[in-house]
Image (cartoon, rainbow, N blue to C red):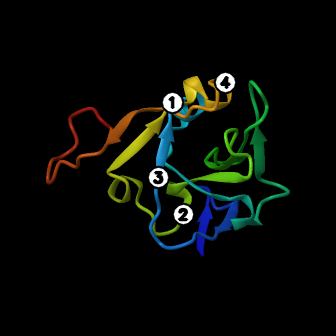
Amino acid sequence: MRKGSCHCGSVQFTAEFVGEALVGSRCNCTICAMKGAVMVYLPMEAVAVTAGEADALACYRFNTMAAKHYFCARCGIHCFHQTRSDPDKYAVNAATLEGVRPYEDFPEVAVFDGQHHASDNGGVRRQAGWLRFEPTPGEPWPEGVI
């Protein structure tokens, strides 16, 4: 069992994963490309909102209205979403889980082709590519960044 929360802590939840190894992925659809989160998937019944459901958790739907994207209405952090391709699952933003370090824990992540969604493509799920993070040890931030 892992605890999760948005940035401000208004939305809190638990996620029960089978085993401890988390497998992350990303998607290149319009919303996923903008939020840029590494997602880990699990059955919907494995996620339980423990705080903020009534007053902070908001839902955004678009296009086919099939996927439900849940985020904190206060800080804006995307927590999880009910997927369009497998509506019995939630995709949880790995960065919202306690003890998860998205860059270190997922240095290489498959990116799936949500721009050509399996539901619109004869059920074929395609991989669009890979996203890799390579840390630069000991290097300071470039001038003018952050």
Residue 24 disc label: 3
Q: Residues within 10 Å of mark 4 (few under 14, many from 20)?
A: few
Q: CA distance from mark 3 to mark 2?
A: 12 Å
Which image quadrant: the C terminus? Answer: top left
Callout in the foreground (4, 2): 4
Residue occupying the point 32% across, 51% down: 107
Q: CA distance from mark 1 to mark 4?
A: 11 Å
Which amino acid type corresponds to the residue marked 3 in the rendered image? Answer: Gly
Callout in the foreground (3, 4): 4
Q: Are marks 4 and 2 in contact (CB under 8 Å)?
A: no
Residue 97 disc label: 2
Q: Are marks 3 and 4 in contact (CB under 8 Å)?
A: no
Q: CA distance from mark 1 to mark 3?
A: 15 Å
Q: Earlier in the sequence, mark 1 or mark 4?
A: 1
Callout in the foreground (1, 4): 4
Residue occupying the point 41% across, 42% down: 110
Determine which residue is flagged by label 1.
113
Q: Earlier in the sequence, mark 3 or mark 4?
A: 3
